[in-house]
Image (spheres, rainbow, N blue to C red):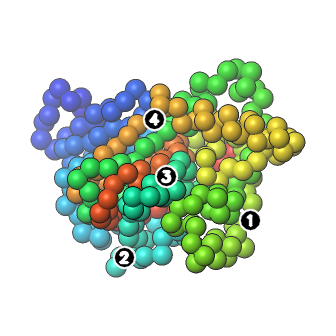
C-alpha cells in the first residue's frame, strides 16, 4: 500500500501530491524491478493524480517498454518517425528555441491521438538527456475544468459532440513537426487514415467514472449542430477555460526522470523554452476506450 511522506519504510511506494489540482511524484520504487503490489499502488496513483513523475530511475529500453506494457499494449506514434531499438519505443527529440521562433516552436496544449476513435490511454517519457533548465511539461485536468463550469453550461454541453481533426491544427500550429513541407505531406497522408472524428464534449473517464470536459486545444475544431460562429466562440471559451492555472501542474525533468500521464484525463503542453539538446524515450499506451462509452 502507498504511504504518506511522513513515513518512509524501505520498499514502500511513496506518493507526494504536487498541487491541489493534479500530479504527484512517486519515490521508493525501482521501476526496473517492480512487485505486483507496488505496481498496483502506482496504477492507483495514476488514476488518482492523472500525471505521475518518478526520478532517478535506471532503465534499459526493454525495461522502459516492459513498464509501459504493464499498463497496456504499446501503440504507434504517427508524429514520431524515430523508432528506437525496442518495439514501441520512440525517440522524442525536442524543439529547442533558435532565438527567433520560440512561440511558433511550441506545440501547445493537446491530448494525444484524440483524432482517432480510440485516443491513447496514456504515455510515458523517460528523460535521457535534458537541458539544465527548461523543457518542462504542463498538464491540465479535464475533471477540474468540467467541475468548474457553471451548472447551466454543464447542461448545455451534456449532449454536444465535438469534432477532432488531425489536419487543421497541424497546418496552423507552426510547430517544426507539422509546419515543414515534408511534415504537411505526412499530415495530409494521415488525414486519409484519420477522417474527422466525433467525440462527446462531456464524458466519463472509463476507469474512475468521473465526468470530464473532453476537448483539447490542438485537435478539437468544431461543435456539431451549432453555427460556425457559435461553435468557434464556445470552443474558444472552453479552450481558454480548460487550461486555467488552477487546473494545472508543471513537471521538471532531470536525466533519468520518468513522466507518466493519463491521456484521457488531461491535456498536456511541452514547453520549448530551452536551448541545446533534449532527448526522451517515449511510449504510448493503447486503449480500446471510445469516449462517451
Ligand atoms: Fe503529446
User: Dot 3 lies on which element?
Assistant: helix
Q: Earlier in the sequence, mark 2 or mark 4?
A: 2
- Position of residue 240 relative to residue 257, above or below, is above
Which mark is on residue 272?
none
- Res 200 seen here: yes
- Observer-side mark, 3 or 2, equals 3
Name the residue nearer the viewer: 237 or 51. Answer: 237
Which mark is on residue 195?
1
- Which residue in the structure is indicated by mark 3? 103
Labels 2 & 4 near each other (Cβ < 8 A): no
The x, y position of residue 27, in whole percent, is 22, 43
Residue drawn at the location 66% of the way across and 35% of the way down = 238
The x, y position of residue 242, in whole percent, is 58, 35
- Observer-side mark, 4 or 1, equals 4
- Which residue in the structure is indicated by mark 4? 248
Labels 3 & 2 near each other (Cβ < 8 A): no
- Observer-side mark, 2 or 4, equals 4
Amino acid at each position: 500500500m502507498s504511504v504518506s511522506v511522513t513515513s518512509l519504510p524501505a520498499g514502500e511506494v511513496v506518493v507526494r501530491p504536487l498541487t491541489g489540482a493534479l500530479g504527484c511524484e512517486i519515490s521508493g520504487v525501482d521501476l526496473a524491478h517492480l512487485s505486483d503490489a507496488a505496481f498496483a499502488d502506482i496504477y492507483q496513483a495514476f488514476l488518482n493524480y492523472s500525471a505521475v513523475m518518478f526520478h532517478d530511475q535506471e532503465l534499459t529500453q526493454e525495461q522502459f517498454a516492459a513498464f509501459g506494457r504493464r499498463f497496456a499494449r504499446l501503440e504507434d506514434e504517427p508524429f514520431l518517425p524515430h523508432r528506437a531499438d525496442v518495439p514501441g519505443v520512440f525517440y522524442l527529440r525536442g524543439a529547442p528555441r533558435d532565438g527567433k521562433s520560440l512561440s511558433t516552436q511550441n506545440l501547445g496544449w493537446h491530448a494525444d491521438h484524440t483524432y482517432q476513435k480510440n485516443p491513447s490511454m496514456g504515455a510515458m517519457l523517460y528523460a535521457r538527456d535534458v537541458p539544465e533548465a527548461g523543457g518542462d511539461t504542463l498538464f491540465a485536468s479535464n475533471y477540474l475544468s468540467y467541475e468548474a463550469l457553471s451548472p447551466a453550461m454543464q447542461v448545455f454541453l451534456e449532449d454536444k459532440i465535438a469534432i477532432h481533426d488531425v489536419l487543421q491544427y497541424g497546418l496552423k500550429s507552426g510547430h517544426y513537426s507539422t509546419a515543414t513541407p515534408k511534415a504537411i505531406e505526412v499530415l495530409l497522408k494521415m488525414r486519409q487514415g484519420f477522417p474527422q472524428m466525433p467525440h462527446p464534449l462531456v464524458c466519463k473517464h472509463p476507469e474512475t467514472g468521473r465526468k470530464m470536459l473532453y476537448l483539447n486545444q490542438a485537435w478539437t475544431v468544431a461543435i456539431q449542430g451549432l453555427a460556425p460562429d457559435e461553435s468557434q466562440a464556445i470552443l474558444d471559451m472552453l479552450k481558454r477555460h480548460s487550461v486555467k492555472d488552477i487546473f494545472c501542474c508543471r513537471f521538471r525533468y532531470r536525466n533519468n526522470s520518468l513522466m507518466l500521464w493519463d491521456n484521457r484525463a488531461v491535456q498536456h503542453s511541452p514547453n520549448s523554452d530551452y536551448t541545446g539538446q533534449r532527448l526522451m524515450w517515449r511510449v504510448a499506451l493503447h486503449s480500446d476506450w471510445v469516449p462517451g462509452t
